[in-house]
Amino acid sequence: MKLVIAEKPSVAQSIAKVLGAAGRENGCLVGNGSIVSWCFGHLVELASADAYDPKYKRWNTKDLPIVPENWEYTVPPGKAKQLKILSGLMADKRVDSLVCATDAGREGELIFRLVTEHCGCKKPVQRLWISSMEDSAIREGFRNLKSDSEYDRLYDAALCRARADWIVGINATRLFSVLYRTTLNVGRVQSPTLAMLVQREAEIAAFRKTPFYTVELNCGNFTATGDRMPEKQAAEAIRMACDGKAASVKAVIRQEKSAQPPKLYDLTTLQRDANRILGYTAQQTLDYTQSLYEKKLVTYPRTDSKYLTDDMRDTVPGLVKTVSAVFLSAENPPVHAERVIDSSKVSDHHAIIPTRTFDGASLSGLPTGETSILTLIAARLLCAVGNPCVTAETTVTLDCGGHAFTAKGKTVTDSGWKGTGRRFLDALKRKPEDKPEEAVLPGLAEGRTVANVRASVKEGFTSPPKHFTEDTLLSAMENAGAEEFAEIPDAGNGVPVQAQRSGLRGKKEGQRDGRKAETAEYSLSRRGLGTPATRAGIIEKIVKTGFVERKGRQLLPTKKGVSLIGVLPETIKSPALTAEWEAKLQQVERGDLPASAFMDGIRKLTEDLIKGASAPKAGQNPFRSDREVVGVCPRCGRPVYEGKKSFYCSGYRESPPCGFALWKDDRFFTSKKKALTKKIAAALLKEGRVDMSGLYSRKTGKTYDATAVLEDTGERVNFRLEF
């Protein structure tokens, strides 16, 4: 029998239905020669630092860098039962081979491999690689199972990513938290993302609006505009020279222009549109799309491709007709399939499109968020294969008093794909985002004169850069490293921040997962911060840790976030340098770079980071709190502050939170008629013990002297007396 392991129970149920595994056993479905079971996401994870040495429970810069030679793993709370079930199934004599059916991507491969390695399974493994949860796609996938060895490089890249994030995150977070005496979460990708937000705010703060002036001619039924001028006096001189005079038509240019349809959605583009049009966060969009995928309504979401494969050419017309009938009630939509077909531009998965499963199915029961996302995906498919939007544009050049003026007009002759898009936006109750269409110019010919024009001066101002939204931040993350970043003052310490463009190039080639061999230049445009699958999580993390706040749709760095970027060295906060590491991960995945070489680079980066860091000088700690630090937490080394009811660790909001606290109403002290004062708490935190006098004995009614000793188990705070 084959043991099929999916990433989630819902996916396992869909696979079991197709395979005919209808019998239920403990943690699995059985039947027709197959056993189908599941993970709950990551069942095995990299262990925390103290798994290597108990001394790492306390944060100390002298212990850095922490770089494991032999990696330890742990099972997250609540997942041991399912891991035990999978281990038993792998050892089951009925099972002769396994099928990896976790999500077809880097993270899915990591989830499966860590489980099989943890369980010591040596049975042969095949890989299910599908882009849709439709029954037909599952059947086709099982007819074309690959050897899992074809995905070894994918696993290598996934493991490198996880270990690199662990090494940089553990060491950098401990280093800067201890140096600056506050919890500072530093990450290989999240810190450069935060840096882009801080840089943008610095640009906005440094911006000084500059006025400019234009002269406009009111020609009756149309308006002509002159060039921008920096000086109002010069503009006024032109106005006076033209006002009430005649303007002659010097040139009339008429052109027909076509706006080509957009490409299909990859995840990042879908997240950007959902944020701009619907106001959804990147994480919300990913969650909604993942749910639609598991409901068999859309294809695999975590893709960076905007095209379909050549073998899908014949299925596109039927799919477009089905989608159009459901969403637009149109029977014969235009279908230019050649625009969306290109296997050479498809990596692991093709673009996100609707499936045919929803044909005839009721969509009324879907949550609002899922319905909106499905509508966007359907709209993009119909737009992508639709007709161009054709406009007739006219540009007229006039002369008045020896000065040139221009008037432009536009008429839409075929709305094409833009008309389709407007219908979908109307369905979503959103206004079309197109700019107001230009006025239609009257019939004008060269040599014609317009008499008695009225001239006026209009004042305008240059505009500052816009605050980042998730839409624009996702774009910046995707394109980080593609071109040089402008040098701007760093808001934290006045040191210019400039990401250096690198000339790293390589070739993309291979035949992993059976797709057509491809050779293409691997250039800077392929770099970026994170991957389509991880960018939403990165944004959520910098918000959750208090470095960024959402204000409407804007993402704004907090004071803490600005200060952090001010103290971090360039190697850990540079978007371009981090994008280079992402490019190297892709090289590992393609087999162009050994995994060991990537990890050597990460170790070197971490070592250099620690060597170059130093504690701030007196009075120069931007994170200095006005609250008095009572002591250092014995569990995590963070500052302990006094609250109304306790002396608590400042790491209580971190992930995972530190729950250490000395409660003022602890029965150990109240029963002895003693108050847990700040002085006593400070002594307990520093020495672990404190001499006390006048302790009350309930048995004798008398008082006595003794030493109170703090005993912290890591989960519970206890006290005892020594006499």
Image: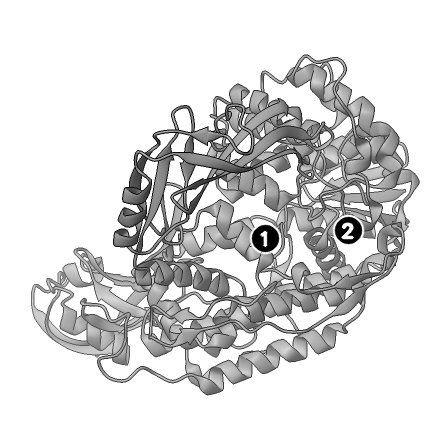
User: Hey, which quadrant is residue 415 in on the image?
Assistant: top right
- Cα separation between marks 1 and 2: 17 Å
Does 69 appear above or below 344?
Answer: below
Note whether residue 25 is visible: no
Crowd tier of the residue under label 1, counting other residues whose Cα lies within 10 Å: few below 14, some 14–19, many 20 or above: some
Residue at coordinates 89% horizontally, 32% vertically from top-left? 32
Residue in the foreground of this view, choosing between 416 and 312: 416
- The residue positioned 41% from the left and 80% from the top of the image is 60
Q: Nearer the viewer, mark 1 or mark 2?
A: 2
Q: How many marks?
A: 2
Q: In screen coordinates, is 645 left or right of 145?
A: left
N-terminal of the pair, mark 1 or mark 2, is 2
Residue 33, percent from left and from top? 90, 36
Secondary structure at badge 1 equals loop
- Residue indicated by mark 2: 347
User: Which amino acid lies under the numbered mark 1 shown in the image of this protein?
Assistant: Thr
Q: Residue 598 location in percent, x, y?
A: 69, 74
Question: For this view, does 574 lie left or right of residue 462?
Answer: right
Quadrant in the picture for the N terminus: top right
Residue pointed to by mark 1: 534
- Residue type of the residue flagged with mark 2: Ser
Determine if residue 480 is in view: yes
Q: Position of residue 502 (x, y in %)?
A: 63, 73
